[in-house]
Structure formats: C-alpha cells, structure tokens
C-alpha cells in the first residue's frame, strides 16, 4: 500500500458519510413518508425500508472515495486497489462489531439482528466496500 494515511482519511470520511446518509434516509422515511419509527419491538418500518438501499449507498460512495484515494497515488496499481479493498472491508467488519453490536446505544443491534436478520444486505455492503477501491482504480484507467 502506497499511502496508508491517505487511505484511512478517505475510508473514515466515506464511512461517516454512508452512516449519515442511512440515518437521514431513515429520518426522511419517518417524518416525510410517515413510516413507523423505532420502538421497543425493533428498529421500525422507517429503518427497515432503507435496508435494500444500504448496498447502493456503499457501492457508490466507496467507489468515489476509492477513486479519490487511488488518483492521489503517484503510481496507482490494481494491487494497491485490491489491498486497499481488503483493508477497508476488514476495518469495517471489526469496527461494525463494536459500533453496532457491542457498544450499546439506541440503534445498536444484537449479533443475530446484525449478522443474520440483516442478510443479504450486510454481505452486499461488505462486498461493496471491498469493491470500492477496485472500481475507483478502474475509473482512473478511463
């Protein structure tokens, strides 16, 4: 990897933006589309209806930020993009365990809710994050 610091900058900025987009989409569903909010039974319809969109947010945004990272390299290579994808998805998988499961907050989920009930979306999200730098690299070839 040519520039780990730059890679981490783009990864964390993108992770924060993707998270904000998901939250704003949920808020939009609840307040504008009048869907059921979170309650003691679960995350609510407002959130549940956003799930199919999560992989789309991730593939678009992580590809853009992957492109920003790769285009900032002196000599971008497919290998760098591949390594970046592996690092990004690995960090995300570990961080998600802490941020969405282990650390309790109003939006935290159980292991089952996050890794079983959230299928196929969580798997597609992780594939999108892995693919983001690779797609970004391919855009630099155009």
Image (cartoon, rainbow, N blue to C red):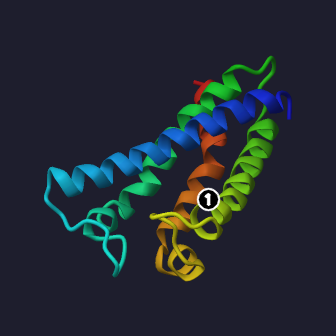
Provide residue 43's location: percent of width, then percent of height: 36, 70
108 vs 4, left or right, is left
Residue nearest the observer in this picture, 130 or 37: 37
Provide residue 110's location: percent of width, then percent of height: 55, 78
Tell me if I can see residue 86 in this picture.
Answer: yes
Residue at figure coordinates x 21%, y 57% from the top left:
30
Q: Residue furthest right?
A: 1
Provide residue 35's location: percent of width, then percent of height: 18, 64
Residue nearest the observer in this picture, 46 or 2: 46
Q: Secondary structure at mark 1?
A: helix
Label 1 environment density (alpha carbons within 10 Å; few <14, some 14–19, many ≥20): some
Q: Which corner quadrant holds the N terminus?
A: top right
Residue at figure coordinates x 31%, y 73% from the top left:
39
Residue at figure coordinates x 53%, y 62% from the top left:
124
54 vs 82, left or right, is left
Provide residue 136's location: percent of width, then percent of height: 61, 34
Residue 41 image-quadrant placement = bottom left
Indicate whether 59 appears above or below 140. below
Residue nearest the observer in this picture, 121 or 112: 112
Indicate whether 110 appears above or below 88. below
Residue at figure coordinates x 40%, y 44% from the top left:
21
Residue nearest the observer in this picture, 32 or 39: 39
Q: Which corner quadrant holds the C terminus?
A: top right
Tell me if I can see residue 138 in this picture.
Answer: no
- What residue sits right under mark 1 in the picture? 99
17 vs 138, left or right, is left
């Amino acid at each position: 990897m040519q520039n780990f610091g730059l890679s981490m900058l783009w990864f964390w900025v993108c992770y924060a933006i993707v998270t904000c987009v998901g939250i704003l989409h949920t808020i939009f569903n609840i307040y504008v589309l009048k869907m059921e909010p979170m309650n003691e039974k679960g995350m609510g319809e407002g959130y549940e209806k956003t799930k199919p969109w999560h992989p789309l947010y991730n593939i678009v945004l992580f590809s853009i930020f992957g492109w920003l990272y790769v285009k900032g390299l002196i000599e971008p290579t497919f290998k760098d993009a591949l390594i970046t994808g592996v690092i990004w998805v690995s960090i995300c998988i570990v961080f998600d365990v802490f941020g969405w499961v282990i650390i309790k907050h109003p939006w935290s989920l159980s292991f089952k809710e996050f890794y079983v009930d959230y299928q196929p979306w969580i798997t597609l999200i992780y594939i999108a994050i892995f693919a983001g730098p690779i797609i970004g690299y391919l855009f630099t070839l155009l």
